[in-house]
Image: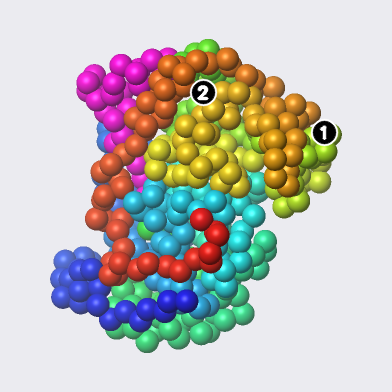
Amino acid sequence: MRRVFRKTYRFGLLGLVAYVFCCSPGGSSDDYDWGLPDGVDPPQVPEDNPQTLEKVELGRYLFYDTQLSDQDNRACGVCHEQAKAFTDTFPRAVGTSFELHPRNTPSLTNVAYFTSMTWIDPTVNVLETQLLAPLLGHDPIIEMGMGGQEDLLLDRLKSRDDYQTLFPLAFPGEQDPFTIENIARAIASFERTIVSWNSAYDRFQRGELDAISESAIRGRDLFYGDAQCGRCHGGPLFNATTDEDGEILEAHGYFNTGLYDIDGAGSYPLGHEGRMEKTADPEDMGSFRTPSLRNVEISRPYMHDGSADTLDHAIRIMAEGGRDNLSGPNVGDGRANRFKSPLLEDLGLDASQLEDLGAFLRSLTDHTFLEDERLASPYPEFVPVFPTGSK
């Protein structure tokens, strides 16, 4: 296990001093410059947590700080790496004590626009409260492990000179700004800046007609046409359920995509039953939230359990109407799963069409987003330790 104590930062304490003098405390969301392209609205911000530059900067430090985990080896930014579209490329998330989460780490790309933030629970829809689950929770695993150790966490943060500057700036007028609630508010404010609207396809849509290839254009036509991918991956975030005319029906859909059928009666493996884990309704077996496809090229592996290792592999599974597991512990033909969405069927696509779909999906990569210094860690590079076989 690697533990790192940091006293030097990407921009250094001189940068913090400059930050203090150039930025005035307070402000409101109405004053915040989101830097979004024309036609893109900023995400909604709770009235009790207005968006301010000071809060965002504090949130950036906290987002990448491993001191927020029990064993000083995990941070939000360890499982949500910017260069990987704010996911981690591991099949399943890994907690501070090396427990494996049953599900894959979802990308945080445009998370502030989501109306549901987890794989199976649509009631988790506010960033400030969602954050408390990995930070303090124990179900389904211990992720950060600070539940019951809130005083230790606050003492760690209070001991740092940079936080002694940043917390009062972010929460001016509070006698003691070092609270769990303010940690959540600051990180949520930073997460609302994790926005991606400058992919090659976005530029194509804005009139830069040579921004994507002819193959990607054919893939787009297939995506919204015969392949019907847009029925589940519609809207500007590519995660909305739509009708045949492309009108959004639901901001997020929950679908069984035919990954498993281990008993011939529709069952998924234990711990992978999807929304049924919350609703106890057998019809929800294997149903998971539709993820956004923005930056999907970067956010491997795919599916709720990370069982599709490449984008081309994931495209094939969807194009074939599910997956036939011929070996291993979960043998069964998911394509015949009785609970599989009727929108998913074998499309009979040839190799050229599959390549075109891949080209279109790769055109959704936003390289400026992946390299934006405003979203980067303020700390020196940290290489986390993961258990053997987790990747």
Q: Position of residue 313 (x, y in %)?
A: 51, 34
Foreground mark, 2 or 1, reads 1
Q: Position of residue 129 (x, y in %)?
A: 56, 60
Residue found 28% across the figure and 42% down from its top: 367
**Residue 239 showing in the rendered view:** no
Name the amino acid, label 1.
Gly
Q: Which residue is identified by label 2?
A: 230
Which image quadrant for residue 175?
bottom left
Asked whether 42 or 381 is in front, the reply is 381
Q: CA distance from mark 2 to mark 1?
A: 29 Å
Helix, strand or loop at disc 2? helix
Q: Crowding near pointer 1: few (<14 within 10 Å), some, many (20+)? A: some
Residue found 51% across the figure and 29% down from its top: 315
Number of dots carrying numbers: 2
Pointers 2 and 1 in contact (CB under 8 A)? no
Q: Which mark is residue 264?
A: 1
Q: Position of residue 282 (x, y in %)?
A: 82, 39
In the image, is residue 227 part of the stretch drawn in magenta?
Answer: no
Residue found 75% across the figure and 35% down from its top: 332
Please report the bounds of the magenta region as a residue range: 193-221
Asked whether 190 or 387 is in front, the reply is 387
Which residue in the rendered view is the most extreme toward the front? Answer: 327
Residue found 35% across the figure and 68% down from its top: 382
Which image quadrant for residue 378?
bottom left
Disc nearer the start of the sequence (2/1): 2
Helix, strand or loop at disc 1? loop
Q: Is residue 23 left or right of residue 277?
A: left
